[in-house]
Structure formats: structure tokens, C-alpha cells
């Protein structure tokens, strides 16, 4: 978040607002669901349930924080060196 974008590069906050995080989440989830059957010892139903629950949680958090982009900014150490840790803890506990 606090990384300065290179010339012509989209800042992370803008990319999140444009939906790139959801695209990445969807791509990773589709890949993982597509290869679950490759492990014969894996409980596929349990693994699928865990993946879907995690993806739903991440998606809900992203949807909530897309409404308030400033909350992403306050998690940056560069701009908020004294309070960024509290903002990160608030973010991770937001859906509890």
C-alpha cells in the first residue's frame, strides 16, 4: 500500500477500487477448486468448504473496504507510522 508506483503503474488502492483484487481472488479460487481432485488423500468436501468460506470472507472484507478507501490508507506505515498497526487489527477483526 505504501509503495510508490512506478511510472505508468496503477497505485494499489486504485487497483483494488477497480476490482483487481476480486479478479485475483476469483482466479486463485478457480485454480484451487480445479486441482482439488489431484490429491487422493484430501477430503475434497471439507477442503472445498474451507476454500469457499475463506473466499467469501475475503470478498466481504474487500466489498466493505471498497466503500471506505481511506481505511486502506490508514493501514500504511509510510503515512501513519504510529497507528497503522491498530488499523490493520481493526481490518482483520471487522467481520467478526
Image: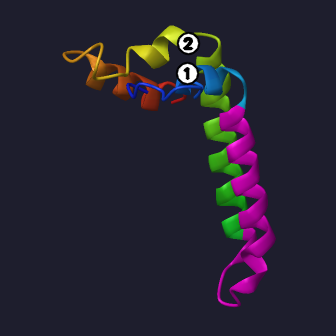
Which residue is the site of mark 2?
69
Q: Is residue 17 left or right of residue 75?
A: right
- Quadrant containing the N terminus is top left
Please give the name of the residue rendered at 79% of the width and 58% of the height, measured from the top-left corner. 30
Asked where in the image residue 9 lies, by quadrant, the reply is: top right
Asked where in the image residue 35 lies, by quadrant, the reply is: bottom right
Question: Callout 1: helix, strand or loop?
Answer: helix
In the rendered image, residue 41, in percent from the top left (x then y), is placed at: 65, 89
Asked where in the image residue 89 lies, by quadrant, the reply is: top left
In the rendered image, residue 38, in percent from the top left (x then y), is placed at: 74, 84
Q: In the drawing, what numbered circle is on residue 65?
A: none
Neighbour tally class for label 2: few under 14, some 14-19, many 20 plus, Cα within 10 Å: some
Please give the name of the residue rendered at 35% of the width and 22% of the height, measured from the top-left corner. 76
Which residue is the site of mark 1?
13
Question: Callout 2: helix, strand or loop?
Answer: helix
Q: How is the image coloured?
A: rainbow
**Relative to 49, is 18 above or below?**
above
24 part of magenta stretch: yes
Q: Which residues are magenta?
A: 20-45
Front residue (pair 82, 9): 9
2 and 1 marks in contact (CB < 8 Å): yes
Outermost bottom residue: 40
Amino acid at each position: 500500500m505504501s509503495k510508490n508506483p512506478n511510472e505508468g503503474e496503477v497505485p494499489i488502492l486504485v487497483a483494488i477500487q477497480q476490482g483487481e483484487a476480486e479478479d485475483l481472488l476469483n482466479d486463485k479460487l478457480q485454480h484451487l477448486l480445479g486441482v482439488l481432485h489431484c490429491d487422493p488423500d484430501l477430503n475434497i468436501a471439507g477442503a472445498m468448504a474451507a476454500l469457499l468460506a475463506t473466499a467469501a470472507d475475503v470478498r466481504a472484507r474487500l466489498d466493505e473496504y471498497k466503500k471506505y478507501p481511506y481505511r486502506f490508507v490508514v493501514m500504511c506505515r509510510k503515512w501513519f507510522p504510529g497507528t497503522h498497526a491498530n488499523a490493520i487489527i481493526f481490518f482483520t477483526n471487522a467481520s467478526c
